[in-house]
Amino acid sequence: MKILLTGASGLLGNAYAEAAIRRGHKVIALYNTTEPIVRGIEQSIQLDAQALDKITALALELWPDCIVNCAAISSPTDVDADAILAEKINVALPRHLSQLSTHLGARLLHISTDMVFDGHSAEPYRSTDMPFPTSLYGQTKLMAEREVLKHNAEDPVVLRIPILMGNSIHSQRSAHERLLAAIARGETPKLFCDEIRQPCSASNVAEVLLELTERRDLHGIFHWAGAETMSRFEMGQRILKHFGLPLNSVQSACKDDDPEFANRPSNLTFNLHPIV
């Protein structure tokens, strides 16, 4: 299968490229600034994700069987800092890829987030539950989901994922990398004990995304996350233990005690079902 992959140098994009190549697929990797480091990539092409006309021209030249969109501004802070750019990358690009994949007769798989939910539910979220994002980042991702499902006639897939773990190209993407960097700067990060998440490794999500790529009988919205639920603070403690660092390198905090963070989602866990 010929796969056109956006966001190929990101944490998930890089892991997906590795998984797809191992399975014998041809991967054409699009990246913004940093070339992905994956042996066996068919082509690596530097291309601004805002250049929709150039993406169209490339896709018409390559005529891929599948488009996998891992490109996004995935930091809520970065989205708040530049809402215009976030709309272009997180909404306009998926919309365009959805329309383009329909023209090509190609499958589209789009990565979304657990942050399309408000986190107020006492139960894990199902893929059929009504989303209600509380952040601008979550709003852009929800808009993207709707655009993908609205404009695509080739049985698209939306895969919602949690916080990702793993090693990125510049060691700046994953939760443990950001935490270790903060500690290295002499900071003592505050991690919330009342914010429950379900982290997962990028390599595991990549394998699931690849299965969805290969199985055209599966389409719609899917949830995937790690098997364990834990608070942000518990997550930090596990990271510190893994790297042999003092457990007091992070502080426990309650988001409800800080007005700045009180609206952060409390429970973003998923009700997981096997992909069958």
Image (tube, rainbow, N blue to C red):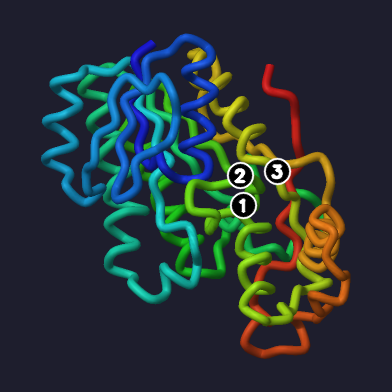
Q: CA distance from mark 2 to mark 1?
A: 6 Å
Residue at the spot of label 2: 161
Quarter the C terminus occupies: top right
Q: CA distance from mark 3 to mark 2?
A: 8 Å
Q: Amino acid at mark 3?
A: Cys
Residue at (47% x, 63% y) in the render? 137
Residue at the spot of label 1: 114
The image quadrant of residue 19 is top right
- Drawn side of residue 247 relative to residue 21, left or right: right
Residue contact at pointers 3 and 1, CB within 8 angstroms: no
| Disc 1 packing (10 Å; few <14; some 14–19; many ≥20) | many
Q: Amino acid at mark 2?
A: Ile
Q: Position of residue 267 (x, y in %)?
A: 75, 61
Residue at (22% x, 48% y) in the render? 48
Q: Position of residue 36 (x, y in %)?
A: 40, 38
**Element at label 1:** helix
Residue at (35% x, 47% y) in the render? 34
Residue at (44% x, 24% y) in the render? 39
Work out whether residue 223 or residue 20 is closer to the camera in this orientation and state it.
20
Of labels 2 and 1, earlier in sequence is 1
Work out whether residue 176 or residue 208 is closer to the camera in this orientation and state it.
176
- Drawn side of residue 89 relative to residue 168, left or right: left
The image quadrant of residue 105 is top left
Q: Amino acid at mark 1?
A: Asp
**Element at label 2:** strand
The image quadrant of residue 8 is top left
Of labels 3 and 1, earlier in sequence is 1
Residue contact at pointers 2 and 1, CB within 8 angstroms: yes
Q: Is residue 257 above or below residue 206?
A: below
Residue at the spot of label 3: 200
Residue contact at pointers 3 and 2, CB within 8 angstroms: yes
